Amino acid sequence: MNGTGPTVEGPLAIVCGGGSFPVAVADAVARNGRRVVLFPLKGWADPSAVARYPHHWVGLAQFGRICRLAHQEGCRDVVIIGSVIRPKVSQLRPDLRTLRLLPRIVRLFRGGDDHLLSGIGRIVEEHGFKLVGAHEAAPAILVSHGTLGQRQPSAADIADAQRGFGVLAAIGPFDVGQAVVVAGNRVLAVEAAEGTDEMLARLATLRGAGRIQHAAGTGVLVKAPKPGQERRLDLPSIGARTVDGAAAARLAGIAVAAGNVITADIADLVRAADAAGLFVIGVDPAGERTG
Amino acid sequence: MNGTGPTVEGPLAIVCGGGSFPVAVADAVARNGRRVVLFPLKGWADPSAVARYPHHWVGLAQFGRICRLAHQEGCRDVVIIGSVIRPKVSQLRPDLRTLRLLPRIVRLFRGGDDHLLSGIGRIVEEHGFKLVGAHEAAPAILVSHGTLGQRQPSAADIADAQRGFGVLAAIGPFDVGQAVVVAGNRVLAVEAAEGTDEMLARLATLRGAGRIQHAAGTGVLVKAPKPGQERRLDLPSIGARTVDGAAAARLAGIAVAAGNVITADIADLVRAADAAGLFVIGVDPAGERTG
C-alpha cells in the first residue's frame, strides 16, 4: 500500500477469473474514466459479466496470446483477479510461450499458494507488463478501518479478533490460510486448503452437534493477508456469502485487517451483515497483532 | 519425561473417560504388579472394559466422592485418562466439594483446552494427590523413536513432517490443535476444535472432489503436543482409526513427536499401518522443529 495507485496512462488489462470481483474492479476503474480491456479465462470467468467491456477470451495457459493481445491493446498495467481453483497442470493446454515457461510453472506449483502467486507475478513483469493489485487499481473494493453496518463488536469480540490476528501472524511464515475463528479466547478453526466457506460450514456443524460450548452469538471470523503474501494477486476477500456462513456458524461477527481485505460489493456486504445481526469491522492489524 | 516413572508405593487411581486408553493403562500398570483402582466416569467410560478391575463409578463432577474413595483405597497417585468431550457446565451435577470449586472451574472453561487441563491438574494436587501422566505410569503407550511397521517414509515425507512440526510449534502458544497435514511442502489442514478424525475426513472429501492437486499417496499427518501443554492430562494420541483416516485421505503416512504421543494398542496400530501401506514414524521433535 503506497497510496499513490498505478500509473493512469493507457488502458488497464484485467485477467478475469471466476466470481464477482473482476467486474467489480472493471466497474470501479471505468467509473474513474480509465479504459479497461478484459481477458476472461475460459472455464472461470462469467460470460454475462464481461460482455459490457471490450474483452478477449483466453485459456488459462495461453500466456503468449494474453501478452500479444494486451500489447496490441496498448495495455502496460495488468490486474489478475478472480477465483481460479488450483488447476491440474495436465488441464492447462499451454500455448508456445507458456510451454517454454512450463518447467518453471511446474516448480511453482510445488509450494504453497504464495510461492505460486509470487512466481506468476515475476513472470508477468518479465514480459514487459506492470502487475497491479486489484485493490491498487480499484481502492473502492478494500474494507477500510471501522465498523460497517449497524452492529458493534463487544470488548470480548475485539479480544477474540486480536487473538485471531495473532494466530494468523504466527502461521504466516508457513503460507497456510488467511482466516481463523476465535470464540471466548479459544481458537475454534484454522483455515487451510478447504477455504473460508467450508471452514465456517464445519463450525456450523460442530455447533449443531453441541461440540462447541461457547454460546451461540459468540465467536469472530478473523481474516488477514499472510505476512509477505503477494498482495497484488491474492488479498483475502469477504462478501455476503461469508456473512451468511458466519451467521450459520452462529458467530458474533467478522473482523478483517483494514485496508488488506477486499469485497466485491460493499453495499451487499452491509445489507447481509445487518440482516444477520452480525458486525463487520476493519481493524488496524498493526496495532492488534499480539504475537 | 524424567525417565524415573511415578513412585510405586500404594495403588494407582485411574479416573477413566471414554475410549480404549483407560484399560490399556490399567493393563500396563497391572502387568508390572501394581494394584489399580478405576474410577470410571458415568456416561464416558466403557462398563465392560472396567469390569476386570476394582472400580467405583463416579460422576464427572463428583470430585468430593472421587477424593473420598481414592483416599479410602489408599491411592496417592492419580491418572486421569480417556476422552471427555468438553461437557456443558449445566450438565455437571456437582457434589458439594465440586460446588465449592465451581466458580474456579467455570473460569477454567473460558480458555483453551490447556487452560482447563492445567487448572484441573492444580485442583487435584491441592487435594493431596499426585497427578501422574498416563504415559509416566504406563510408558508402553508412548510411540517411541523410529518407524513402526513395514513402510518407510521418503525424504520428501520427512521434509513434510518437519514443516508440520514447525507449524505446530508456531501455533503452540495459541493453544490450538495438535495436528496438521502437509503435502509437498504445502499445509493442507490445521486441526482445531474439530479433532484429528474430522480433519482427515475433510481432506478425504477435498481429495475426492479434486481440490487437492498433490498426488494421492503424498502428504503426512503430523502430531505433537503443544509447547507447554499439560502432558499429564492430554498427550495427543493415534491409533488404528487414525491410520484409517489418513488412508482415506490418501496420505503417505503419520509422523509423531517421539515419546510425546500415545497409542492404546501398538500392535493394532502397526497392523492397520501395514494393511493400509502407510508409514508411522516417531521423530525426535527437538531436531525437527524448524521455527
Image: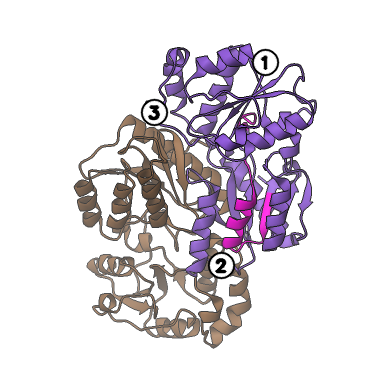
Chain colours: A purple, B brown
Residue at image position (31%, 40%) is B252
Residue at image position (55%, 33%) is A17
Which residue is identified by label 2?
A: B119
Residue A238 magenta-highlighted:
yes
- Tag nearer the camera, 1 or 2: 1
Tag 2 secondary structure: helix
Question: Does the rendering let one see residue B260?
Answer: no
Circle 1: is it few (<14), some (14-19), or many (20+) Cα within 10 Å?
Answer: many
Contact, mark 3 vs mark 2 (Cβ under 8 Å): no
| Chain part drawn in magenta | A228-255
Rendered position, A177 above or below A33? below
In percent of width and height, residue A208 lies at 50, 68
The amino acid marked with disc number 3 is: Gln
Which residue is identified by label 1?
A: A76
Which residue is identified by label 3?
A: A91
In percent of width and height, residue B35 lies at 29, 75
Viewer-proximal residue among A284 and B62: A284
Tag 1 secondary structure: loop
